[in-house]
Image (tube, rainbow, N blue to C red):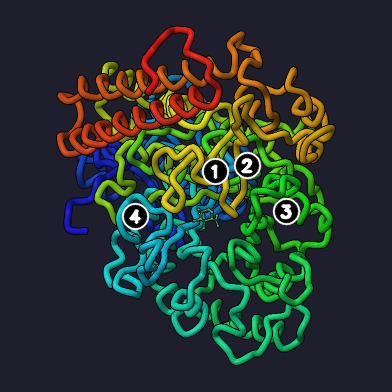
Amino acid sequence: MTDALDPAWLPDDAFRAVGTRRTLVRGTGPLADTVRGEVAAACARFGGALVDEGAPAGLVLELTDGGASGVGPGGVGDFGDEGFGYARADGRATVTASGGRGLLYGLFHVVRLGEAAFLGGPVREEHRPALALRMLDHWDNVAVHPVMGQVERGYAGGSLFWSDGRARDALDRVRAYGRLLAACGINAVCVNNVNVHETEAHLLTDRIGEVAAIAAALRPYGVRTHLSVTFAAPVVLGPLPTADPLDARVRDWWAGVTERVYEAVPDFGGYVVKADSEGQPGPFAYGRTHADGANLLAAALAPYGGTVHWRAFVYDHRQDWRDRSTDRARAAYDHFVPLDGEFAANAVLQVKHGPMDFQVREPVSPLIGAMPGTRLAVEVQATQEYTGQQRHVCWLGPMWSEVLRFRPDGEVAVGRLADALVAVSNVGDDPFWTGHPLAQANLYTFGRLAWDPAADPRAVLDEWIALTHPDAGRRLTEGLHAVLDGSWAAYEKYTAPLGVGFMVQPGHHYGPSVDGYEYSPWGTYHFADRDGVGVDRGAATGTGYAAQYAEPWAKLFESPGTCPDELLLFFHHVPYGHVLHSGKTVIQHIYDTHFEGVEEAEEARRVWAGLADLVEPARHARVAERYEEQVRSAREWRDQVNSYFLRKSGVPDERGRTIH
Ligand code: GCV
């Protein structure tokens, strides 16, 4: 952390329009003070001024007192803690909020608009987040783990929060992080890995002071702190012999510990739990259900308004590949749907967006929408575990938008069903925050889609470009769109085809290995043989997974004739000669997309090289260097996947290209 910190989407120049104005900030409280501090800093740079009541002001940022002043565009006091009104007339802008966060978000709204916030005809708008909780989960270990390192699946250096086995002494960077998060609407952070090792278990008790220090650094920007805890805490931390959720001693233990957590962190958000999952302890050991487990922690948190995020990532990771009846994709639904209605009101079931594990293409998890009596958090992965590990450009906005717009019952979109959207963070102590500077766009886009899941991701990308590069002209804007817009699609093209997933090197998950997981205990993914490829997940002849969906999806996915091309091999085992809706055979699609994907990566590298005169040199160089690796890796993927399927199928490429 010695290098200068990249300002990401909050460079000084992004505040020019605010900083040149005379601004009145009306209201009291910590977040109003943060707003005042932001405006004062901008004014110091650009010549504007904070003014007192009664003086003429071009910008008014007003925290209402619940009705006294009556200037709110949508009626005062009805914005909750996070919403705000924005109005513009006669060159003057007004933000009205009834809560501190709303005021802060209103300020950043004006920052995003820039001069347009003040100029043009009158407007009156109301803004409220669609989802109440917009959270980042950090898979950060306090102590460096011998296999997973400091940040599990982290590609941006060490942890922002932890170093040398404890919380960092200097937390100004954490404060700067909170500021970036507030500017895109994120309001919660879980500061440690869901795989809770022994050192990290102590954060809950004797090391809660370290968590409190981090929470204090995030608080000025309205970001609440959450903690991952181990279900076995009463045993691991002692002195109990059991963690049985129905044991009174265990209930008392959690109640006492949680009381002390709130003494240290009064606005603590709650616990995140990975239980009975990939070796983590859970209620199954005591013959109890996951509702019993979640409700235990929910009861401890309830007196303080806290929430337990209970992860639904429960599956058998000790499978036998010879057993074709076990289907990892089915697991979360099979485990949790029978428990619908049994979870406490402050328990939120946190479900990965797909049924597997953040692959480049998965169907939306059938669990989403299947538990109407249970609160839902949808989890996506900003850290690019399976999407190029921040060495490849892979802007995930379009993927997340597809998930959020999906309508599980054919009517209500995921973005409206969910209570919360959670992303596994892609941030570390790297000076560019995210390792790959363009991966910052993923973090920003996540926050904005969590605020408004119906937003057009390309419009969000426009915002990110304009904030990050306040002087971006047309050439830079178009260049950034050219390298980012289609990057997810390109990544999909040169990696695992048609929804089949995985094909990565086991363990670290970078680079191709078509059979890497095929005969492993973690699940079996493609079943390729000389005749065909894909997994039969239909109800008629396969694992029955397709029937977990409501209509119209169950029927649509059941038949290869109606299943969307991009998911065909996730749902069906088909011959290589099977003709897709696109008109191509499966085998020719595999060849063509792998050649195209590499060409698109090469073209993006060329476009980026052409932007050298428009991008700050260190930033340009970092991206250019990573494009070399991306192109190398994309060629490796192409050659391994194409050679594998040529050898399996014996079907030549109809265009006669070189396949090794
Ligand atoms: C934190 C995948 C990842 C693990 C991760 C797990 C999870 O299996 O490879 O590193 O563990 O998901 O989401 O819990």
Kindly report the distance in space between the C-alpha atoms of the residues bearing marks 4 and 2: 25 Å
- In primary-sequence order, the first of circles 4 and 2 is 2
Looking at the image, residue 32 lies above or below residue 518: below
Look at mark 2 in the image and give the residue it sits on: 354
Check disc 3 and give the amino acid type. Arg
Look at mark 4 in the image and give the residue it sits on: 428
Residue 61: tell me if it is visible: no
Please name which of the two marks, 1 or 4, marks the residue nearer to the observer: 1
Q: Do the residues bearing badges 3 and 2 touch, measured as CB atoms within 8 Å?
A: no
Q: In what quadrant of the picture does the C terminus appear?
A: top left
Between residue 256 and residue 38, name the one nearer to us. 256
Q: Residue at x 63, y 29 (%)?
A: 569
Between residue 68 and residue 633, name the one nearer to us. 633
Looking at the image, residue 636 lies above or below residue 577: below
Please tell me whether mark 2 sits on a helix, a strand or a loop: loop
Look at mark 3 in the image and give the residue it sits on: 375
Check disc 4 and give the amino acid type. Gly
Between residue 155 and residue 443, name the one nearer to us. 155
Q: Residue at x 21, y 47 (%)?
A: 44
Kindly report the distance in space between the C-alpha atoms of the residues bearing marks 3 and 4: 30 Å
- In primary-sequence order, the first of circles 3 and 1 is 1
Looking at the image, residue 540 lies above or below residue 259: above
Residue 44: mark in rendering? none
Mark 1 C-beta closer than 8 Å to ligand 1: yes
Q: In what quadrant of the picture does the N terminus appear?
A: bottom left
Percent position of residue 650, x then y: 52, 19
Q: Where is residue 127, by image quadrant? A: top right
Residue 358: mark in rendering? 1
Kindly report the distance in space between the C-alpha atoms of the residues bearing marks 3 and 2: 17 Å
Check disc 2 and give the amino acid type. Gly
Percent position of residue 393, x then y: 36, 33
Kindly report the distance in space between the C-alpha atoms of the residues bearing marks 1 and 2: 7 Å
